[in-house]
Image (spheres, helix red, strand yellow):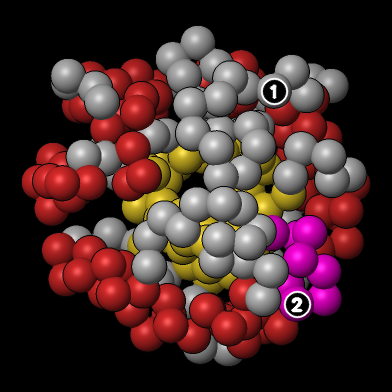
Amino acid sequence: MKIAPLAAPLWLDVSLWSADLANLERDIRRLEPFADSFHLDAADGHYVRNLLFFPDLVARIRQITAKPLHVHLFATRPMDLAPLFLQAGADWLTVPLETGKRVWQVVEWAQNRGCKAGVSLELDTPVELVRGLRRRIQHVVLMGTPSGEKGCALDDRACDRLAEASAHLEGAGVLLLADGGIRRDTVPLLRASGAQGIVPGSLLCGAEDPGETCQWLKSL
């Protein structure tokens, strides 16, 4: 499926999971000039095995940066945790579509409180489902690797899924983000497939010159 050129620069939702967690404030200040938002994976230990970021830590990060904080909430009961992350300073919330009807409880609750809300889709979830969601959400995160696992290669299905999602969301004003497998050789493919934004981790956090990497990403 051919995708028309995208006019807006690539949105960089920088994942702090790949930052130096022992020097988190240093890395946030180093990356802040290049990030459009910061992506914070949070979990309950059930939906995925890792726990990752927690509300008190998000509250501390909120004191360090004015950039939007995007909490990707991997939880089987997301409404139990969503209020804690909003109180901590989250500007965006994303909930896996796979959590079922609980998604809409969180999305509507968050939007009523001025927080942007969206959904993520695992690799095996049919992409055509996003067509029916386009009027209810601000963003979609398409996973290109298994959730909760770090350092995985981009799945072979990821680009085709992005192209399909882009077609379903055309004209809806919904930001389409690619998450997982973000590498220097995969980003051009993801962008060409319709990604409006990416969730870069080590690509930016580990860059010797994040400014140069950012300039290259924004040129795609």
- For mark 1, give the secondary structure: loop
Q: Name the residue: 76% across, 38% down.
A: 123
| Place of residue 23 in the rendered image (x, y in percent of width and height, measured from the top left) | 12, 46
Q: Depth check: 48 or 182 in front?
A: 48
Residue 177 visible? The answer is: no
* Residue 207: quadrant of the picture: top left
Q: Residues within 10 Å of mark 1 (few under 14, many from 20)?
A: some
> Residue 140: where, in percent of width, then height?
66, 52
Side (left or right) of 178 relative to 151: right
The secondary element bearing badge 2 is classed as helix
Question: Which amino acid, mark 2?
Answer: Arg
**Residue 181 part of the magenta-drawn span:** no
Crowd rating for badge 2 (residues with CA inside 10 Å; few <14, some 14–19, many 20+): some
In the shown orientation, is residue 59 left or right of residue 164?
left
The residue that label 2 is drawn on is 102
The percent coordinates of residue 68 (x first, y second) are 35, 62
Q: In this figure, which residue is indicated by the disc labeled 1? A: 155
Residue 202, quarter of picture: top left
**Above or below 178: residue 154:** above
Name the residue at 61% across, 53% down: 48
Residue span colored magenta: 96-103
Q: Residue 40 vs residue 50: left or right?
A: left
Q: Looking at the picture, does residue 161 appear above or below residue 71?
A: above
Q: Which mark is residue 96?
A: none
